[in-house]
Amino acid sequence: MDWVAPALSAALAQRRQVLRLGLGAAGLLILGGCGFKLRGATSLAFSRLQLVGASPQTPLGQELRRQLGGRVQLLEPPAPVQVVLRVDGAQREKIVTGLTSAGLVRELVLRLRVRFSLATAQGRSLIEPTDLVLQRDLSTNESASLAKAREEEEIFRVLERDVVLQIIRRLEAVVLPSTDAEPQTRTPAGMR
């Protein structure tokens, strides 16, 4: 009779596994049947862009060039461009939000502010100057200050990637105006 419990346990485990596989397959069929698909990169309404104010030596400038590089031609001034993306400022801020009883910093808010605008080559505004502000909390520990400095830098890099993706989403919504029409924006898929 000692063999009954392990055999019953093995049979139940096998049944659970078959049930999980069946439920997973049913879930995929349901998602496929409703038209669900992952959102890919949408096209931009322009193919030639000049990037102003985002130095290639800065992490934000590097990330912008990386994200835009495969989608549009990044050109410099004498070349004919369709639009000009201007990044007027990117500020990193550290704000102390908590102290220990000894007066040491316990918690910080890391904030990234970026101001950008988009205009046609003729100077017609497509995206008015817009401020994007992202922030994350960071707890500190004086005994691990080097690790916290690395964590702080990594958080700023994540914030820079996030802000670049937000800028890209706004660029995807731009529709180049005809010479007589007012600038318009389209609603990207998934934001309706």
Image: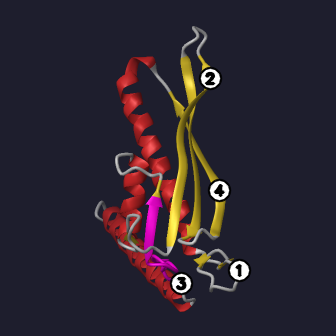
Q: Earlier in the sequence, mark 4 or mark 1?
A: 4
Magenta residues, dominant SS class? loop
Q: Of the residues tagged 4 and 1, which is closer to the observer?
A: 1
Q: Secondary structure at mark 1?
A: loop
Q: Residue furthest top?
A: 102
Q: Which mark is residue 36?
A: 3
Find out whether residue 38 is within the magenta segment.
Answer: yes
Q: Which mark is residue 130?
A: 4
Q: Amino acid at mark 1?
A: Glu
Picture quadrant where residue 146 is located: top left
Residue extent of the magenta highlight: 36-51
Q: Earlier in the sequence, mark 2 or mark 4?
A: 2
Q: Gap between marks 4 and 3, in whole Å? A: 32 Å
Q: Gap between marks 2 and 4, in whole Å? A: 30 Å
Residue 141 rendering spot, x and y as whole percentages: 46, 22
Q: Which residue is mark 1?
A: 182
